[in-house]
């Protein structure tokens, strides 16, 4: 992916929330940096089940956490 992305190009990643620490650690040796993250919560368990991460190439700066998203309960879908 290093060669395919332009400088300041965006890459979006949707992954399990319990893997966020491993994702951040993997980015230490990468040209990509975490720019924004949104946690997705399950209403029944009140636990984060997913993370939506925006990664940028060649752009450093602070990480912003967006307002969390809540998955609807099964009967509300």
Image (cartoon, rainbow, N blue to C red):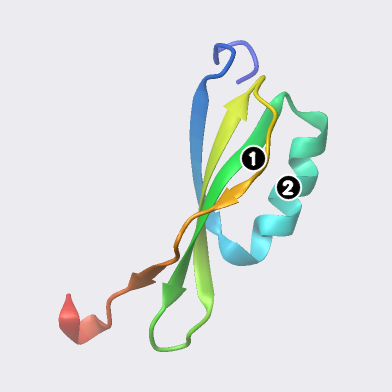
Instruction: Kindly check if marks 2 and 1 are in contact, taking CB atoms under 8 A apart as contact.
Output: yes
Which comes sooner in the sequence, label 2 or label 1? 2
Q: Is residue 42 above or below residue 23?
A: below
Mark 2 vs mark 1: give the one in front. Answer: 1
Q: Which residue is mark 2?
A: 24
Image coordinates for residue 15, horizontal then vertical, percent = 53, 54
Specify the quadrant that holds the N terminus: top right
For the C terminus, the image quarter is bottom left
Question: How many numbered marks, from 0 up?
Answer: 2
Please indicate whether residue 33 sits to the left or right of residue 77 in the image. right
Image point 18% across, 86% down: which residue? 75
Q: Is residue 49 above or below residue 51?
A: below
Residue 3 in percent (x, y) is at: 62, 10
Could you say which quadrant of the image residue 35 lies in? top right
Q: Is residue 68 above or below residue 7?
A: below
Helix, strand or loop at disc 2?
Answer: helix
Label at residue 46 = none
Local packing at callout 1 (Cα closer than 10 Å; few below 14, some 14-19, many 20+) is many
Q: Who's the residue at 24% across and 82% down the image? A: 74
Instruction: Report the Cα–Cα distance between label 2 and label 1.
Output: 7 Å
Secondary-structure class at tag 1: strand
Percent x, y of residue 29: 82, 31
- Residue located beneath label 1 in the image: 34
Residue displayed at 64% across by 66% down: 18
Which is more toward the observer, 65 or 56? 65
- In this view, 33 is above or below 77: above
Residue shown at 72%/23% (left/top)? Answer: 31
Crowding around mark 2 (Cα neighbors within 10 Å: few <14, some 14 to 19, many 20+) is few
């Amino acid at each position: 992916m290093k060669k395919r992305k332009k400088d300041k190009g965006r890459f979006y990643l949707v992954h399990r929330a319990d893997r966020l620490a491993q994702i951040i650690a993997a980015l230490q040796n990468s040209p990509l940096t975490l720019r924004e993250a949104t946690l997705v919560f399950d209403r029944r368990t009140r636990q984060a089940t997913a993370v939506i991460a925006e990664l940028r190439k060649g752009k450093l700066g602070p990480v912003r956490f967006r307002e969390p998203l809540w998955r609807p309960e099964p009967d509300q879908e």
